[in-house]
């Protein structure tokens, strides 16, 4: 049917059943280039808002829906997603041994913020103990309160965290505490009232952080040989310079010089692509666009270089699409699945080891809604029928990324150099050998788009030395429209079920590698080579 021959690197437009399909050559190395980056099997991880943590984990029994969502991801890499429990409400948490799990006070909700963070969150031992409900092998980061500048609050929380992780329930569940984070986005204390704006500098931060770290490291028995370390930074933005809230500023003010500072082994940055409280199709396309994804992440390249130069790891331990808990009709849609897939994979290429997608009960940008909702996440209106725990479209990106990473533990990846502003791609290697590739067409095809759905005819061109694969399977993320908020399938299977386990028959195509294939606007595919 496709008669046009591939002429060198020239893009050819052919007529295919009346629809214009553009021929796009994609060159894939058959053996790993030296630039290939080793992927952390928990590249795709989650940050959970601290106030409603027990809704996620479950109190007297595990929340099996949440467990299954994590377990699906674990099955694909052999490693459960890492979990950070923190964010805004971390700086509003205090400890009271008389509280069993947690007692929170929430401000009034609004159409823009249907599920606000707690203004006050008082927790007891049970709150930390329910970490035992997560899949075996889960690694945890817990944030303690620095915002209210009450060292007793942080100390008591740290002691309760220690008690939980030393309990037989948590130990036998194989769950480990890897990092303590002191304060959430201390750079914003400047304008949220937690510190005096005229004196809150990066130097003041380093001094106060060190005071807290002295106390907490003593309380938790942390030292050069302990597994438990500090996650540094966790700033909301970055000034990228020595006198700003940034990794560069932390290092310039000598944070790493104290014995406590030497317990920082990883730097965390938070990032959202923007703040929008109202969505639109244009905004959804902006989010998905290849160049804006690269722009948002590459902004941090100087910080990553400065961090790596200190021999430290660098992660995004809180991120998602748009702040305001997501833009309605954008963050909660299928387009966000393609955004998060390209975002997490591109992040890996520039030295970000892990990306923790932030989640809160009822937030628009969630991958997972772990609890029954009675209000609309879009405008706070009362729902006619409560919504049971469910997955949102962006969850599918975790399945795809993790299938591409696989279970080798040492998979490496490179971004493919594709001459197309809408098509991004990555190749995955085990040992030196090409195993898989992901291609993403991020042109948004909306319910309001008129005309036929644009497609690209992908023609693979293998390069480098090594055996060229003969056949491949094509597994598709099927999306009707970029602005759909449900109804996706991955290899023919839906995960939008009561228990988050897949339903339907797995369906992939097996074809010769030289046969080419179509990639529609708003579609992603995983190619597995043999
Ligand atoms: C195939 O890849 C080789 C090596 O990367 C390149 O020189 C050549 O132009 C490519 N051909 C096409 C059709 O893209
Ligand atoms: C840490 O702070 C707590 C509460 O204020 C205090 O009881 C404890 O002695 C402090 N520990 C250290 C090592 O300063
Ligand atoms: C600091 O936290 C402790 C422990 O919960 C609490 O007793 C105390 O009242 C707090 N201090 C202030 C000033 O809020
Ligand atoms: C902030 O600090 C400045 C300078 O020390 C002082 O004049 C001002 O009163 C402080 N503001 C508050 C709200 O404490
Ligand atoms: C980040 O992404 C948003 C769209 O989501 C875009 O508007 C913005 O320009 C991007 N920022 C950079 C620095 O590329
Ligand atoms: C990239 O694609 C454009 C058309 O979209 C074409 O004009 C150009 O020659 C291509 N560049 C390369 C290096 O293939």
Image (tube, grey):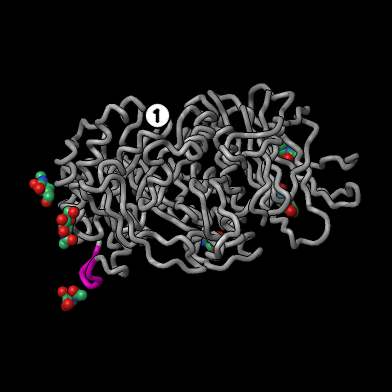
Which stretch appears magenta? 195-201
Q: Principal SS element in the magenta part?
A: loop
Is residue 207 visible to us here? Answer: no
* The quarter of the displayed image where residue 121 is located: bottom left
Q: Is residue 506 above or below residue 364?
A: above
How far across and how far down the image is residue 346, in percent?
A: 53, 45
Q: For the residue labelled by badge 1, is the local secondary structure a helix, a strand or a loop?
A: loop
Q: Is residue 337 above or below residue 189?
A: above
Residue appearing at x 64%, y 59% in the figure: 285
Q: Is residue 501 above or below residue 156?
A: above
Left/right placement of residue 432 relative to residue 219 reads: right
How far across and how far down the image is residue 385, in percent?
A: 59, 55
* The quarter of the displayed image where residue 208 is located: bottom left
Residue appearing at x 47%, y 45% in the figure: 350
User: Which residue corresponds to mark 1?
Assistant: 137
Is 200 included in the stretch rendered in magenta? yes
- CB of mark 1 near ligand 2 (< 8 Å): no
Residue appearing at x 35%, y 33% in the figure: 132
């Amino acid at each position: 049917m496709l008669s046009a021959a591939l002429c060198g690197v020239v893009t050819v437009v052919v007529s295919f059943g009346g629809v214009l399909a553009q021929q796009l050559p994609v060159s894939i190395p058959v053996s790993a280039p030296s630039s290939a980056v080793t992927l952390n099997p928990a590249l795709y991880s989650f940050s959970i808002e601290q106030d409603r943590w027990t809704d996620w984990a479950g109190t007297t029994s595990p929340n099996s829906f949440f467990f299954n969502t994590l377990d699906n991801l674990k099955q694909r890499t052999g490693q459960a997603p890492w979990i950070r429990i923190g964010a805004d409400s971390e700086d509003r948490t205090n400890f009271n041994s008389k509280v069993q799990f947690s007692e929170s006070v929430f401000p009034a909700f609004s159409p823009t913020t249907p599920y606000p963070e707690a203004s006050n969150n008082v927790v007891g031992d049970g709150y930390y103990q329910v970490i035992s409900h997560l899949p075996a092998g889960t690694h945890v980061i817990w944030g303690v309160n620095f915002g209210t500048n009450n060292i007793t609050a942080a100390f008591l929380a740290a002691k309760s965290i220690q008690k939980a992780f030393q309990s037989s329930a948590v130990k036998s569940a194989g769950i480990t505490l890897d990092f303590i984070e002191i304060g959430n986005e201390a750079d914003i204390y400047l304008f949220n009232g937690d510190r005096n704006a005229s004196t809150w500098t990066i130097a003041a931060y380093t001094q106060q952080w060190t005071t807290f770290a002295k106390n907490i490291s003593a309380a938790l028995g942390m030292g050069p040989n302990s597994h438990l370390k500090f996650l540094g930074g966790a700033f909301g933005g970055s000034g990228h310079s020595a006198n700003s809230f940034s990794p560069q500023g932390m290092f310039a003010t000598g944070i790493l010089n104290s014995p406590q500072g030497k317990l920082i082994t990883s730097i965390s940055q938070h990032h959202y692509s923007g703040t929008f409280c109202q969505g639109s199709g244009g905004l959804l396309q902006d989010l998905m666009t290849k160049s804006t994804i690269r722009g948002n992440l590459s902004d941090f390249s100087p910080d990553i270089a400065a961090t790596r130069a200190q021999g430290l790891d660098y992660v995004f331990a809180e991120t998602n699409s748009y702040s305001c808990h997501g833009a309605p009709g954008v963050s909660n849609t299928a387009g966000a699945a393609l955004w998060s897939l390209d975002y997490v994979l591109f992040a890996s290429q520039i030295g970000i080891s892990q990306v923790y997608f932030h989640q809160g009960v009822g937030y628009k940008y969630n991958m997972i809604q772990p609890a029954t909702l009675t209000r609309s996440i879009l405008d706070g209106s009362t729902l006619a029928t409560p919504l049971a725990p469910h997955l949102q479209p962006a969850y599918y990106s975790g399945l795809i990324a993790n299938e591409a990473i696989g279970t080798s533990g040492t998979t490496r990846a490179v971004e493919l150099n594709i001459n197309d502003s809408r098509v991004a791609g990555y190749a995955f290697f085990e040992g030196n050998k090409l195993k898989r590739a992901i291609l993403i067409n991020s042109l948004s095809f909306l319910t309001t788009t008129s005309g036929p759905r644009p497609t690209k005819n992908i023609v693979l061109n293998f390069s480098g030395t090594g055996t060229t694969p003969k056949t491949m399977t094509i597994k598709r993320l099927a999306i009707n429209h970029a602005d759909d908020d449900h109804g996706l399938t991955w290899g023919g299977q839906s995960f939008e079920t009561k228990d988050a386990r897949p339903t339907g028959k797995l369906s992939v195509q097996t074809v010769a590698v030289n046969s080419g294939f179509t990639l529609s606007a708003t579609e992603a595919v995983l190619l597995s080579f043999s």
